[in-house]
Amino acid sequence: MRAFVLRPLPMTLSSTNTAAGYDATYAGNDLMGVVWKAAAAAAPKLKADLGTVPNPVDAALLFAVGGAATQLRVRAADNSGMTTNLYDSGIIPLLAGTEMPVSGLGVGWWTKDDGAITRRYWEFEFSAAAGTVAPSVGRVTIGERITLARNFAFGGAWGVRDLGKADFSAGGALLRRRAAKLRVLGITFPHVHKDEIERHVLPLIEGHGAQDPIVLCTDPAADVMRQRRCWFGPLTGDLGTTWRTSAGWEWRANLIDLTPIPAGPLYVPPVNV
């Protein structure tokens, strides 16, 4: 399946119950360590108001998800009481895949593949098969996916920006400053149509630049690894496009994911393939 980009819509967040010090609005900023966390309940809810003139929505990805919740229910309506023109996803798996990222923080996933819907009020209900849950969310992103007609090409770069440092003393001793790490991604869309450049790519880079994060999913197909294929962060490097042929443009998307991999040694057991 082809990669997609999502421009997070502005929203006002609230919740049905919140643990002290973990305000719902924290899930709307871009500080992934400043999170909303629910007080333990059977089905805590995080609510989003998209404003009086809401945009169409066909995807919601929740980043830096923690806690014991395993199930998600997404509702959307024209009124805050969630009764008018109601959409209800029913209970679905919370996480995009079963394989957890090295950070230990998950990616919540809801998409509507039969067409976007336009509603002002959105509600995310968290639960588990039994018992109470106290989920935490670093960032809620809601919007309509941009999927270009032709996928990115081979030659992409997946890696890490290490914010720490390892050096050596004059006597040869290891001098180490541990710090968090951030995932980095660089991919190229070499065959973008002119109308896609004008309608989607240029408004994206002109509107967000290198300051405001976007969502990029390199492969939305259902898979145990799909959480690792979801990125949320600012674009970096060259923010332009190249007119390569009379009918083809090139766009290079370089991104730094904002969910930190904590400082310190993290052992990842080998996988038998």
Image: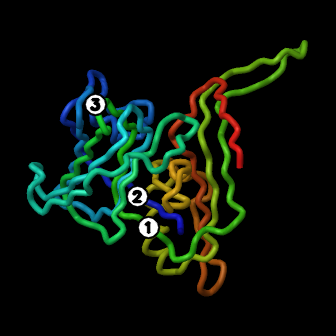
Q: Is residue 118 left or right of residue 134?
A: left
Dot 1 alpha-carbon crowd within 10 angstroms: few under 14, some 14 to 19, many 20 or more: some
Query: Which mark, by number, is residue 7?
Result: 2
Residue type at mark 1 is Ile
Q: Nearer the viewer, residue 88 or 241?
A: 88
Mark 1 touches mark 2? (CB < 8 Å): yes
261 lies above or below 248: above
Q: Earlier in the sequence, mark 1 or mark 2?
A: 2
Residue shown at 38% from the left, 42% from the top: 139
Dot 2 alpha-carbon crowd within 10 angstroms: few under 14, some 14 to 19, many 20 or more: some
Mark 3 touches mark 1? (CB < 8 Å): no
As measured in the structure, the alpha-carbon distance from the residue carrying label 1 to the one carrying label 2 is 8 Å
Residue type at mark 2 is Arg
As measured in the structure, the alpha-carbon distance from the residue carrying label 3 to the one carrying label 1 is 38 Å
Q: Nearer the viewer, mark 3 or mark 1?
A: 3
Q: Earlier in the sequence, mark 3 or mark 2?
A: 2
- Total numbered labels placed on residues in the image: 3
Q: Residue furthest top?
A: 171
Q: How is the image coloured?
A: rainbow
Dot 3 alpha-carbon crowd within 10 angstroms: few under 14, some 14 to 19, many 20 or more: few
* Residue at image mark 1: 146
Query: Which mark, by number, is residue 131?
Result: 3
156 lies above or below 32: below
136 lies above or below 1: above
Residue shown at 73% from the left, 20% from the top: 176
Q: Nearer the viewer, residue 199 or 66?
A: 66
As measured in the structure, the alpha-carbon distance from the residue carrying label 3 to the one carrying label 2 is 35 Å
Q: Is residue 265 left or right of residue 75?
A: right
